[in-house]
Image (tube, rainbow, N blue to C red):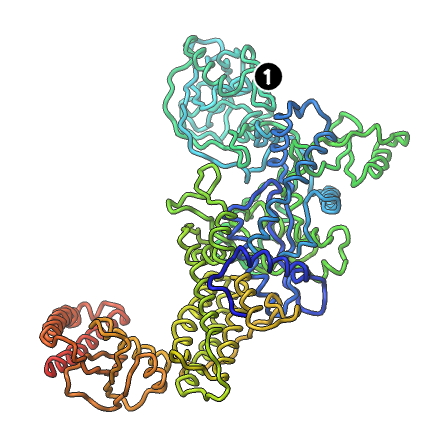
Amino acid sequence: MQIADKYNPQETEQKWYDFWLENKFFHSTPDNRPPYTIVIPPPNVTGILHMGHMLNNTIQDVLVRRARMQGFNACWVPGTDHASIATEAKVVAKLKAEGINKKDITREEFLKHAWEWTDKYGGTILEQLKKLGCSCDWDRTRFTMEDNLSKSVIKVFVDLYNKGLIYRGYKVVNWDPEAKTNISDEEVIFKEQNGKLFYLKYKIEGSEDFLTVATTRPETIFGDVAVCVNPNDERYTHLKGKNVIVPIVNRVIPIIEDDYVDIEFGTGALKITPAHDINDYEIGQRHHLPIIDSMDDDAVLNEHGLHYQGMGRFTVRKEIVKELEQNDLLLKAEDYVNKVGTSERTGAVIEPKISVQWFLKMSEIAKPALDVVMDDTIKFHPEKFKNTYRHWMENVHDWNISRQLWWGQQIPAYYFGDGENDFVVAETIEDAVKLAQEKTSNFQLQASDLKQDADALDTWFSSWLWPISVFEGILEPDNQEINYYYPTSDLVTGPDIIFFWVARMIMAGLEYRKDVPFKNVYFTGIVRDKQRRKMSKSLGNSPDPIELIEKYGADGVRVGILLSSAAGNDLLFDEDLMLQGRNFATKIWNAYKLIQGWKRDENIKAKESDIQTINWFGEQLNKTITEIEDQFSKFRISDALHLVYKLIWDDFCSWYLEAVKPNFGEAISEEVYQKTIAYFEELMKLLHPFMPFLSEELWQHISERSISEALVIAQQKKSESFNEEVIKDFDFAKEVISGVRNYRQSKGISPRETTEVFTNITTINNAGVVKKLANISEINFNQKTDKPSFTFLVGANEFSIPLSENLDLAEEKAKTEEEIKYLKGFLISVDKKLSNEKFVANAKPEVVEVERKKQKDAQDKIALLEEKLKSL
């Protein structure tokens, strides 16, 4: 059936996606083929598709589709992450809009609302990935809060606690007052802010003298418990053992000494507020200082804030400065730029806060996870990220795994008293009761006597198990699927979660499978706009991916985003690339339309030029397949696409089809037609991972196919040896053809006007192709012409075309003289350089060689033009 004049992605994409789904082409079950496994970096259940997802998932789909077409049992596991902070914030906002305050409802009621919200909105992003063409095994879709995955998380928590790797500790944490939870160090984004450095007067007890202390946060003085100076600071030797009075608070506190204090910063005297600064907390621990927490969970001052009780921290900062001035307790205030920690999720300014939290000891499990990356058991692409990884792993802190949230796996610790150790850790309440009875020797204890810890676990504590838990490898460590699919093959992710997720998955894999979770990690770049800004909804610089798909087609968008995405380098988004992708689809469609429109005749034999072209393209195809395999082995996906693009656009469309197409009104040999179709099918196989919809549509048009012959599961041609000489010979022919075409174009001569060519060589291996594509009536080998002619070189070989009678010879002579004059001037500058002994002695040999080549090329060209001038 004749295909339509234009390719219509909107008609095609849904049709083929439904066909692939109906026939379970994406579904995988263990069999005797080698597995190729990818687990999706689970997007937040709150998420919608953005440009970063587009890039990441297109790359994953290319890898999975290619593996499927290379004989692997390809399994791409999709799913979503429950995203504790983000989802809880959405549900809290929804409840607020309905007039419900989270504080006024129970945990169970809140979770009911959270599940309703998740059921309603949680699948949006996965549906959008289908529009992109992602060939995930949708039957395997997982969610980090589903029952079995939650059970896996709890089992691991209990196991690590029993191994002594998880502990409960009293530390300063990063408190997000908007999300009402602590967050990890990796979730804190430091931003430069303009502020003030305030110099406060701390009066020395029993004296009118004072000690000046510089601070950017005067609102925290209500938690001051000491002033600290460096023991080597001679300015303060006389104050050793004395006390000062906290301004406004009027609390007497000691002056202490510690090497931590920077003599050069501020006044060299540091106020110590252990409840509100991590470094102050550590100094406080060393010096056995008390802790005064002067703020509540909303970053509002509590009873310790005296008359500022109930006021927010930034309001207090403004007001307390006024009071300090009025009481002559502020020496001065200077403009100051400092880095302020903000929450990655909410943007709120972080408040360091003393708190009891749960921690996972990292040093023990980090070491083996560092080794497997440094020795390339796991390969990073690009390799530069190994250094980033090593730096973090060598300086790793214990992981704060508890969050003051309700949406998430609830920490399986059960309290039976108020003492510091009055708790047990267990997978179920029943197990907890037994443990509590044993621990207390009180066998009357019941479930009602125990109270479960209110905190939830950090989201990453569930997603670090993802490559294992999606195959039930925690609950059933020896099941068929985990043994078959684990370790997975490749991970595609962004470098921004190298610590949150990549490092922790490696730790979990080594801890629970004694094996790495994947063999390769491909780090994508960040998608930026033309001004190099990261694309984000807040900046309004991110296009809607679904709108792009509607405008350019999914294949056009996939090609557009891949063409400029070298591994690990940021991608500068340019919508023109999407247009290039769509134009590529149009080019391929038109190529097939051209082939399909040819008349065929079984009685016609293939011409010499047809056979030459077919032989060349077969070798070129094998060479390109070898190069594509090499690029994929290096995870240079963009470069692999460029090779496919060139093979189709340049080699097949511009050269092959032009060389074999029949003259107007004539038929083509059936043999040549069938060979052309066979080549086109091989090209569709190579193209399919990048442009799945267009390629399947054309594949199904070429001939009647059974379901088992669908392109999505067709096997790509493997790389074979190729004859480089055949390719070189054809490249030579292409240069001759281009030379003749340039002559016609530069002289304004119609391509239909035949010409003859004279050359100093004895033969051309693809003479038939040259004569056809350059419209040459005769190639005169080993001959010169006396007629005025246009001459060009291919390598050292000379080709002359007698000038058309339609040309103005006087004008041609003037042009030739001008060209000789220019070349002679150029040659003088090159000769000068090469006659300079210093240059020849000191320059790199390859640089000197380039200059010598320039010299010879100019000399040869001048000789040719002077010959031409004589003939003119």
Residue 830 visible in this rendered orientation of the protein:
yes
Q: Residue furthest front?
A: 665
Considering depth in this image, is 415 or 482 the residue closer to the camera? 482
Left or right: 339 as drawn, with respect to 483: left
Residue 81 location in percent, x, y? 64, 44
For numbered disc 1, what is the local secondary structure?
loop
Examine the image and state in which quarter residue 275 appears.
Answer: top right
Residue 133 location in percent, x, y? 57, 56
Residue 837 visible in this rendered orientation of the protein:
no
Left or right: 303 as drawn, with respect to 210: right
Considering depth in this image, is 697 or 71 the residue closer to the camera? 697
Q: Residue at x 39, y 15 (%)?
A: 331
Q: Where, quadrant-wise, is the N terminus in this rendering?
A: bottom right
Residue 422 location in percent, x, y? 77, 30
Examine the image and state in which quarter residue 94 appears.
Answer: top right
Considering depth in this image, is 618 or 325 the residue closer to the camera? 618
Q: Residue at x 67, y 23 (%)?
A: 103
Q: Residue furthest right?
A: 444
Q: Residue at x 70, y 39 (%)?
A: 409
Q: Which residue is mark 1?
A: 302
Residue 715 location in percent, x, y? 60, 71
Left or right: 358 as drawn, with respect to 687: right
Name the residue type under label 1: Asn
